[in-house]
Image (cartoon, helix red, strand yellow):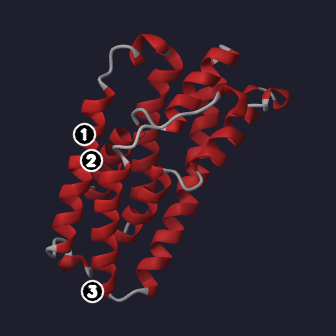
Amino acid sequence: MDAFLVSTGIVGLAEMGDKTQLLALLLAARFRRPLPIVFGILVATVLNHAFAAAVGALVSDLLGADAMRWVLGLSFLAMAAWVMVPSTLNADELPLARFGVFLSTLLAFFIAEMGDKTQVTTVALAARYESMAAVVAGTTLGMMLANVPTVVFGERIAKRVPLRLVHGLAALVFAVLGMATLMGAGDSMGF
């Protein structure tokens, strides 16, 4: 249950103001069809995060417990810094309309998530927790919690959400996880 809850919270916070959330806003403004956009985000996220979690589990199996603790701890600290970097996305980067709303969203989100903060976070969480399914479910729920309101309510939310505060909270959570991991939290789980 910890893997699911931590994954949901971290990705939900990390996604606020991220390029894929900006992409959700652009897709909503361009297509004005929330349902296929939401389903496209869901499918792209599940596929992308399942791949990321598999990589995280593989890395966890390949590294020893001490090396894994250092890699994870430093990765979480790096994510704390990375989450403070604001994301931008150019509307000209979306020449996908010819594929239809669902497929355009799926392709755009899958590609935008490659190497993104939330994908890297999913790799680290899957390496940290034994339940890959709980991590994928949690990171997917976090993405959906951040992006569905963006698709549905768009600019009304963007104007009211203090992104600097949200980014600061996400950075704090990553920093705490990084320090706790480096200090041995989770050693009972084999890390």
Give residue 93's position: percent from left, percent from top: 71, 34
Q: Counting other residues with Cα less than 10 Å from the Cα at mark 3, is it few (<14), some (14-19), or many (20 or more)?
A: few
Location of mark 1 (residue): 168
Question: What element does badge 1 sit on?
Answer: helix
* Position above or below: 139 against 183: above
**Residue 171's mark?**
2
Q: Nearer the viewer, mark 3 or mark 1?
A: 1
Q: Amino acid at mark 2?
A: Ala
Query: In the figure, is residue 186 to the left or right of 126?
Result: left
In three-dimensional space, the C-alpha distance between marks 2 and 3, rounded to whole angstroms, equals 24 Å
Query: In the figure, is residue 130 to the left or right of 24?
Result: left
Q: Amino acid at mark 1?
A: Gly
Query: In the figure, is residue 25 to the left or right of 11?
Result: right
Q: Quadrant of the C terminus?
A: bottom left
Place residue 38 in its image quadrant. Answer: top right
Location of mark 3 (residue): 66
**Residue 41's mark?**
none
Give residue 12's position: percent from left, percent from top: 37, 39
Q: Of the residues under marks 2 and 3, which one precedes in the sequence?
A: 3
How many badges with numbers are in the image?
Answer: 3
